[in-house]
Amino acid sequence: MLEGEETVVRALYYDHIVADPRHQHCRC
C-alpha cells in the first residue's frame, strides 16, 4: 500500500469510528 494511500485509509477509518458511537468501545 502506498504511503499516501495508507494515510487516507487511516483517516477514513478513524473518521468512521468517531462518526459511529457503536465503535467507541473498540480500541484497536
Image: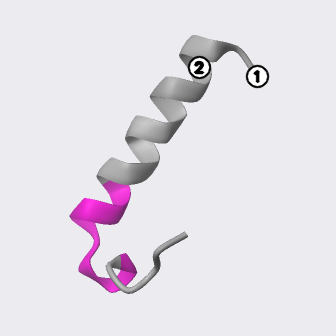
Residue 6 vs 10, above or below: the answer is above
Task: Give amino acid for label 1.
Answer: Met
Q: How is the image coloured?
A: one colour
Residue placed at 33% from the left, 84% from the top? 22
Image location (x, y in percent) of residue 18: 25, 62
* Span colored in magenta: 16-23
Q: Which mark is residue 5?
A: 2
Task: Give amino acid for label 2.
Answer: Glu
SS category of the residue bearing label 2? helix
Query: Would you say residue 18 sits in the magenta stretch?
Result: yes
How packed is label 2: few (under 14 Cα within 10 Å), some, or many (20 or more)? Answer: few
Q: Is residue 13 left or right of residue 15?
A: right
SS category of the residue bearing label 1? loop
Residue 3 vs 18, above or below: the answer is above
Q: CA distance from mark 2 to mark 1?
A: 7 Å
Instruction: Locate residue 12: give its quadrant.
Output: top left
How packed is label 1: few (under 14 Cα within 10 Å), some, or many (20 or more)? Answer: few
Q: Quadrant of the C terminus?
A: bottom right
Q: Which mark is residue 1?
A: 1
